[in-house]
Image (spheres, rainbow, N blue to C red):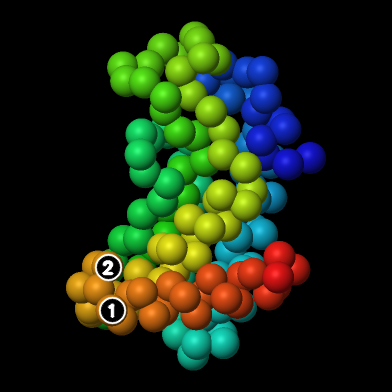
Amino acid sequence: MEFKEVCRGKILKEIWQSEEVKEAKSKLRKELQLLVSEWCKRDRKRRIPVYISLKPKRKIGGLYFQKKRGNGAIVIFPITLLRYPYDVNSDKDFYIRDKESLINTLAHEYAHHLSRDASPHGKIFQENFKKVRKRLIKRLGLD
């Protein structure tokens, strides 16, 4: 089952405590990690880890953290808040993003990894993002 289907109809507290959600999260993380590993191999870059956080964020789909010596990490947030402050006992304050949205966020953050020494959304980043996006569309068969 997909991550979104497993989380459907649950409140945040249930999502955080559910074993089947943890299994779906692990499966999704492995899938996204495999995708990033393929991209890193193709671009001759060091493989970077992908993490999934169940802590809900507002207006943030993912983050790229740059570490020392060229290492980095990507964090993906599949739960998006609709309002803040939110209630952990309500299922109306958030929504779960679908897989395509998560992969698009992953592509955006990977483009940050490719152009980490350039300005965050400058010309080099835009070129790298177009390249990664083109690859992604080709792989998913969305031509």
Report x, y in % for residue 125.
33, 75
Residue drawn at x 75%, y 68% is 141
Locate the C terminus and report the quarter of the image it occupies. bottom right
Is 84 rendered above or below residue 71? above
Q: Is residue 20 left or right of residue 127?
A: right
Is 18 rendered above or below residue 23? above
- Nearer the observer, 74 or 8: 8
Report x, y in % for residue 38.
61, 78
Report x, y in % for residue 41.
56, 85
Question: Label 2 amino acid?
Answer: His
State the SS at label 1.
Answer: helix
Which of the labelled discs sits on residue 123, or is there none?
A: 1
Q: Is residue 41 left or right of residue 49?
A: right
Q: Is residue 23 left or right of residue 58?
A: right
Residue drawn at x 57%, y 76% is 134
- Nearer the observer, 30 or 38: 38
Question: Label 1 amino acid?
Answer: Lys
Cα separation between marks 2 and 1 = 7 Å
Report x, y in % for residue 107.
50, 65
Which of the labelled discs sits on residue 121, or is there none?
A: 2
Residue drawn at x 55%, y 15% is 91
Is 7 rendered above or below residue 121? above
